[in-house]
Amino acid sequence: MNKTYTILNYGCQMNESDSEHYAGQLSDLGYHYTEDFHEADVILINTCCVRESAEKKILGKIGEMKAVKAKDPHKVLCVTGCMAQKDGEDFLKTYPQVDLLIGTAHVNNFKAILQEYLAEKNRKAGIYNDLTIMPQEFEGHFVRKSEYAAWVPIMYGCNNFCTYCIVPYVRGRERSRSAEAICEEIRKAVALGYREFTLLGQNVNSYGKDRGEANAFAQLLRQVDRIPGVERVRYMTSHPRDMSEELIKAVAESRHVCKHFHIPVQSGSTRIMQAMNRGYTRESYLELVRRIRSYVPNAVLTTDIIVGFPGETEEDFAQTMSLFDEVRYDAAYTFIYSKRSGTPAAAMEDQVPEAVKKDRMNRLMELQNKHRLKHNQELVGKTLPIMVEGLSHNNKQMWSGRTDGNKLVLWPVGDRIFNPGDVVPVTIEKAQTWLLKGRAEL
Ligand code: SAH
Ligand code: SF4
Ligand code: F3S
């Protein structure tokens, strides 16, 4: 038997983690991975619907599969993830090339659903409308993409209902895993050679609240920090409204939790923050930034930002620009507002014209790139611990790795061979906007 599968993954880290679950289940059934979907017996497309641009790209790919399936009807095409959850049964009607549709709460049942399909050949939507159920603990093994860095979901869903966002509708309410299950999974991965762990949730600061626990995320971080063999701990995403002093202290006092704070601000204008239902103001957010820097002076700060939210005036946008000048982020993920039907913001008046959104986006990116370059230049001459990723994809004469703040660093291949996950002291010699270059001190 030589059956193969491929997975095309879109969207956030939670989806990447789900894809590793799917890969594990396919491998349990005896399937081998192939990169080429033309070869694969099972093609799984794990989808995202956070912005229209993501949906368009994915629909293009699903369209392409029509011809692939016509040529080779035995192939099984599975569409999973957030778009599948959002569109449900309608999706199967519109796209006859799709055989199985799997919702976001169904990840762990995939193996059973696929086996049933192979026996009965009934096209099927495996969607739970009830997104309050807790995905069961995963019994099988993961097939992880990385050899040294592991995603670890700690909770599912989101209760925040930011007015622009589709995620709460497709991922359901917050459900936390137990700390024991999380630590057990990490210990097992350490035994397999994993060194870096990213704890995942839409709002990790709410971790444990659904189980009636207070300040549970700070405690979980302290617990994970003590697991022998854990070199680096990251987490995402933490909502600025819920970022407690206790959590900042836990990061500051830990040995292995990266001194990197990703605190998505979304807008610099209090008026727009409120229209977004973010639950903080410009002042309280800046206070949080000051608190983080008082505990962790060299903290790397990054953010997510949306330009062109409905009703955003030139004055509101100027507030975003000035907030960026005040905070001076190391990096920012900038998004143009995308209307998601069913969310409150989609029905708001004063939608901002596309050309205005694009112009604001360009101005903000230009400003952010300046800040980023300046931060990188401040690292020149410093020797930093770098976790090795491997040889650089673009230049096999260079090693590549990441700083604690997740910045990409390259250094020349010398006599020493490094393994992914090793930590190497590297002195930074050259700073560019997107890249640092240096020399290893070993
Ligand atoms: N739960 C995480 C991630 C949410 S999705 C968080 O709260 O940070 C990742 C990012 O996508 C968000 O932070 C936001 O900046 C962006 N985003 C979400 N919905 C969007 C929309 N409708 N249009 C544009 N960007 C959006
Ligand atoms: Fe979306 Fe807001 Fe939840 Fe993040 S916190 S997933 S932006 S609703
Ligand atoms: Fe996209 Fe779903 Fe993640 S909508 S961003 S894949 S939670």
Image (tube, rainbow, N blue to C red):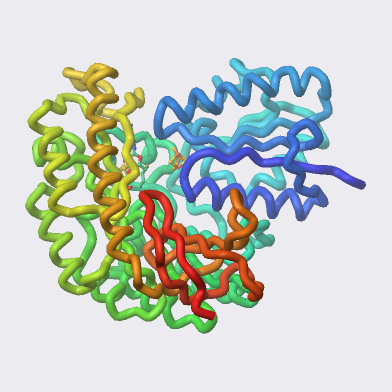
Where in the figure is residue 34, as x and y percent of width and height? 76, 44
Rendered-image quarter of ligand 3:
top left
Where in the figure is residue 244, as x and y percent of width and height? 21, 66
Where in the figure is residue 187, as x and y percent of width and height? 57, 76
**Residue drawn at (43%, 42%), measured in percent from left and top?**
171
Q: Quadrant of residue 288?
A: bottom left
**Total marks placed:** 0
In the picture, measured across the screen, residue 23 lies left or right of residue 407, that is right
In the picture, measured across the screen, residue 33 lies left or right of residue 433, that is right
**Residue drawn at (49%, 70%), measured in percent from left and top?**
439
- The quadrant of the picture occupied by the C terminus is bottom right
| Closest to the observer, 151 or 108 | 151
Q: Relative to 377, does residue 29 appear above or below in the rendering?
A: above
**Residue drawn at (20%, 25%), measured in percent from left and top?**
310
Q: Quadrant of residue 185?
A: bottom right
The residue most toward the right is 1
| Closest to the observer, 159 or 371 | 371
Would residue 158 be seen by someone viewing this image from the given angle? yes
Where in the figure is residue 150, as x and y percent of width and height? 55, 63
In the picture, measured across the screen, residue 405 lies left or right of residue 190, that is left
Q: Quadrant of residue 251?
A: bottom left
**Residue drawn at (45%, 58%), measured in percent from left and top?**
408
